């Protein structure tokens, strides 16, 4: 597979090969994308009819790249009289500075051509090779090529301009140029992605935050965001690198929601550059101690888009929090249900959990009061529409078998939920972590009802329900002979008995009684689940285990961050520390940027974490992982008006110092230091 | 001519207390076009309250579509956000007003309660 290079700004991104070229492709999402539409599918540079080859690329920044190119195959040696630099930046729109350098000592003539085209594919058509219903019309202008796509009133355009004079045809631009000895020539290309409203104006022109920003503005904005985050001082370079990279990536993944006028976090490049309920809330929980200002827009939009009616196509029900919101053609014409799609059973309890956690850190009671109705509707959903079989558990089953999701938990691939022997259960299904989230949501709902909604009777009721759920769950889901919880319930309320990472989330939710926590911790850290880098999604001796199976054996950084949080909650600090150490060591092999997932091979087998073939990167909740791990290692926990700091830094990590942690206390510092036989040399 | 639309607006004030429960406040202009003319409605929305008048006025947000499309919207047969994405309806201004307003729209005709569906299927499969 050709290595791909990506740059992004919010949900606008470019994926090209190492030469900077884009060729039409359905297998991989190459091209220029914005708001789920591909605006360029061909962008191919030739010099005198020849393709160029990359000497090197500079991709140190998330929003710009430089490609250093020469003609001819670099087989033996490079002895070229000419080279080309493509300097590409993205800031809502795309700019590319093309520079041609004549290294010879005489004047030379060149014909430089850039083939251009767009299929205007919706991201879902890239995945599924859909056929376009609308038509693309190229229009040649002076130094400008305009590609227009129309389907009924749906209207998109790509407008490409060149600063240097150029011959334009329907398939691209050709520069016939003469460059003097040791001189250079350049042109600046600008590519605008136009999203037209029915009246013909660009949609983003009327939104409060401008869609197009210069690279300098992006840099300034990212710096400003990073500037507000706590400062990390530490001896452990992987930790410092991962923290830096995470803040950069979280800054880059912020996008302005079309017509919504707020900055939201996109979930991950390239497939998930949009708002996901689950991803945005779990990421919000991770970043709360560091960047609390990222959280209110997410909560507010999710509340605004809360389900209010029954709609089978979208799996919508009153009170339900969305799964995925898309902006493209397939969502608009209802070929896909993402307008928004509500097929997730965990986003609704997570909404209540996040709102409460947000207040505990920030003291922002106003938001909790404003969203009382939304939070109550979410809590009501758990016990009404969420309890499909009336058993007191949270279940899921799509009413849209064609384009809906079968598995509506975080492990949402088709084969993620299985019995230990590999069989797949029927529907509906009730996975265990959903019950943990429901329990936590009820307790947190009770706290908010008592403190902010002036409804102690409701608080009492929620607490009684939570206690009953805990008792019921521990009676029904516990597998006494194996001493762990079942992964799920099948439609006949029989346990789906696989051993999976889901049990780690139960610790985070607090639904595990103290006397069972130790055996859960033991399972999580056993070689069946713990690879040495982290906890696998599925244990190695289970029927469907596959170290490179998406949800059946890979290691997911975000999953591990929540598991570490859960372990720490029950006092298993050393075990949590091992996960922190494993994750941070793994991050070193990915340049500080933890991917969506990596392979589940044992650490001592490969010595490095094996990349999952199509992992998304950067991915918001993976970028949030080092932040949550820091919280876990430093033992940060808000209590009333104070921040409790109770560090337990893993052996060998040395000093970990986090300065200016924002919250209702103002700003405070936390300092931790590892203590162990290997730490003496680090003391100085 | 568009009876459902007329009935929909007439019922809004009485329905507002149970529908508008969030932190919503502002004026929404609705413009509905037919071949010959445009009908305007002005909605002042606040918690538990909706005041409906015919005509134009200063507004924090504007929703426009054909009168025929709006008739489908208020009978649950069409959905607002997908319509905006494909430009069958247009929206500008404070989006929270639009999101609050769409809560007045009914369920899709024929939509099923997921609980009945799950329990029916389970019974049938034995």
Image: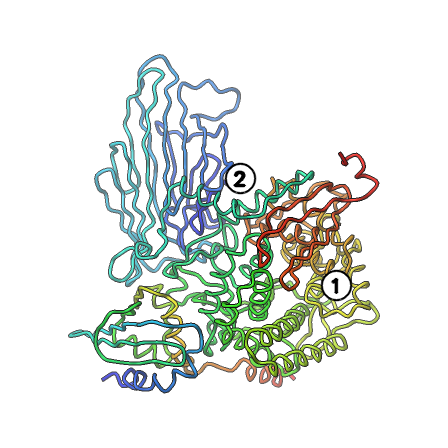
Of residues A485 and A134, which is closer to you in this image? Answer: A485
The picture places residue A607, in percent across and down from the top left corner, at 73, 40
Viewer-proximal residue, A257 or A116?
A257
Q: Are marks 1 and 2 on the same chain?
A: yes
Residue occupying the point 66% across, 51% down? A629
The residues bearing labels 1 and 2 have C-alpha atoms spaced at a distance of 35 Å
User: Which quarter of the figure has residue B28?
Assistant: bottom left
Tag shown at residue A18: none
Name the residue located 49 percent from the left edge and 78 percent from the top edge. A318
Q: Quadrant of the N terminus of chain A?
A: top right
Chain letter, disc 2 residue: A
Q: Residue at x 36, y 47 (%)?
A: A212
The answer to whether residue B18 is left or right of residue A473 is left
Does residue A439 appear to the left or right of A144 in the view shown?
A: right
Q: Nearer the viewer, residue A110 or A533?
A: A533
Q: Quadrant of the C terminus of chain A?
A: top right
Residue B112 x %, y %:
49, 82
Where is mark 2, residue-wise? A3
Relative to A308, residue A50 above or below: above
Please give the residue where the numbered disc 1 appears in the rendered image: A499
**Mark 1 vs 2: CB contact within 8 A:** no
Instruction: Determine the secondary structure under disc 1.
Output: loop
* Observer able to see residue A407: no
Secondary structure at numbered mark 2: loop
Q: In this view, which residue lies farthest toward the left?
A: B36
> Quick one: A439 or A344, which is closer to the camera?
A439
Task: Note whether residue A277 is visible.
Answer: yes
Q: Earlier in the sequence, mark 1 or mark 2?
A: 2
């Amino acid at each position: 597979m050709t290595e791909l290079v990506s740059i992004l700004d919010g949900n606008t991104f470019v994926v090209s090969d190492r030469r900077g070229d884009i060729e039409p492709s359905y297998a991989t999402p190459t091209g220029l994308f914005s708001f789920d539409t591909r605006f360029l599918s061909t962008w191919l540079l030739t010099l005198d009819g020849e393709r160029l080859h990359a000497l090197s690329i500079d991709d140190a920044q998330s929003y710009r790249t430089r490609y250093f190119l020469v003609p001819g195959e670099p087989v033996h040696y490079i002895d070229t009289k000419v080279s080309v630099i493509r300097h590409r930046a993205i800031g809502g729109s795309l700019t590319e500075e093309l520079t041609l350098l004549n290294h010879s000592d005489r004047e030379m003539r060149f014909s430089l051509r850039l083939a251009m085209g767009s299929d205007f594919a919706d991201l879902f058509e890239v995945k599924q090779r859909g056929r376009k219903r609308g038509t693309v019309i190229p229009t040649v202008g002076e130094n400008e090529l305009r590609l227009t796509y129309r389907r009924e009133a749906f209207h998109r355009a790509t407008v490409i301009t060149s600063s240097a004079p150029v011959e334009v045809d329907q398939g691209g631009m050709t520069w016939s140029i003469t460059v003097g000895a040791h001189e250079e020539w350049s042109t600046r290309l600008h590519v605008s992605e136009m999203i037209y409203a029915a009246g013909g104006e660009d949609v983003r022109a009327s939104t409060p935050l401008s869609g197009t920003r210069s690279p300098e503005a992006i840099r300034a904005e990212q710096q400003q965001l990073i500037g507000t985050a706590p400062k990390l001082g530490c001896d452990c370079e992987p930790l410092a690198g991962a923290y830096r990279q995470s803040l950069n990536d979280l800054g880059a993944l912020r996008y302005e929601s079309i017509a919504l006028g707020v900055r939201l976090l996109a979930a991950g490049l390239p497939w998930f550059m949009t708002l996901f309920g689950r991803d945005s809330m779990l990421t919000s929980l991770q970043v709360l101690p560091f960047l609390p200002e990222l959280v209110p827009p997410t909560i507010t939009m999710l509340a605004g888009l809360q389900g209010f009616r029954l709609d089978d196509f979208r799996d919508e029900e009153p009170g339900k929090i969305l799964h995925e919101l898309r902006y493209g053609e397939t969502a608009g014409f209802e070929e896909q249900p993402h307008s928004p799609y509500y097929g997730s059973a965990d986003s609704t309890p997570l909404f209540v959990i996040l709102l409460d956690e947000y207040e505990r850190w920030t003291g922002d009671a106003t938001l909790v009061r404003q969203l009382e109705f939304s939070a109550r509707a979410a809590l009501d959903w758990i016990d009404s529409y969420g309890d499909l079989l009336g058993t007191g558990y949270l279940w899921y089953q799509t009413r849209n078998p064609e384009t809906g999701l079968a598995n509506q938990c975080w492990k949402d691939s088709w084969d993620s939920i299985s019995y230990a022997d590999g069989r797949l259960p029927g529907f509906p299904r009730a996975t265990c972590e959903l019950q943990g989230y429901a329990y936590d949501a009820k307790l947190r709902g009770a706290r908010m009802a008592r403190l902010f909604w002036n409804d102690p009777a409701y608080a009492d009721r929620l607490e009684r329900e939570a206690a009953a759920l805990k008792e019921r769950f521990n009676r029904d889901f516990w597998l006494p002979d194996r001493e762990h919880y079942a992964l799920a319930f099948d439609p006949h309320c029989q346990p789906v008995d696989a051993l999976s990472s889901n049990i780690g989330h139960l610790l985070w939710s607090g639904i595990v009684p103290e006397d069972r926590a130790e055996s859960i911790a033991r399972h999580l850290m056993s070689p069946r689940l713990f690879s040495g880098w982290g906890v696998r999604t599925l244990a190695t001796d289970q029927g469907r285990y596959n170290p490179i199976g998406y949800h059946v054996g890979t290691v997911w950084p975000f999953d591990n961050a929540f598991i570490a949080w859960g372990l720490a909650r029950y006092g298993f600090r050393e075990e949590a520390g091992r996960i922190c150490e494993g994750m941070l060591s793994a991050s070193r092999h990915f340049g500080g940027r933890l991917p969506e997932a990596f392979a589940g091979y044992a650490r001592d087998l490969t010595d490095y974490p094996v990349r999952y073939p199509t992992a998304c990167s950067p991915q918001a909740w993976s970028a949030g992982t080092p932040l949550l791990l820091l919280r876990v290692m430093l033992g940060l926990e808000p209590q009333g008006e104070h921040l409790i700091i109770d560090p337990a830094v893993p052996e060998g990590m040395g000093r970990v110092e986090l300065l200016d942690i924002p919250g209702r206390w103002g700003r405070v510092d936390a300092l931790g230091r590892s203590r162990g036989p290997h730490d003496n040399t680090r003391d100085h | 001519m568009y009876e459902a639309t007329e009935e929909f607006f007439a019922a809004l004030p009485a329905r507002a207390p149970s529908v508008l429960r969030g932190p919503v406040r502002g004026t929404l202009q609705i413009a509905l076009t037919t071949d010959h003319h445009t009908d305007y409605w002005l909605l002042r929305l606040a918690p538990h309250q909706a005041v409906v008048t015919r005509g134009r006025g200063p507004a924090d947000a504007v929703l426009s579509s054909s009168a025929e499309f709006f008739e489908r919207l208020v009978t649950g047969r069409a959905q607002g956000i997908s319509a905006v994405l494909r430009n069958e309806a247009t929206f500008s201004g404070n989006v929270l007003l639009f999101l609050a307003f769409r809560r007045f729209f009914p369920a899709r005709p024929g939509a099923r309660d997921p609980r009945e569906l799950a329990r029916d299927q389970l019974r049938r499969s034995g």
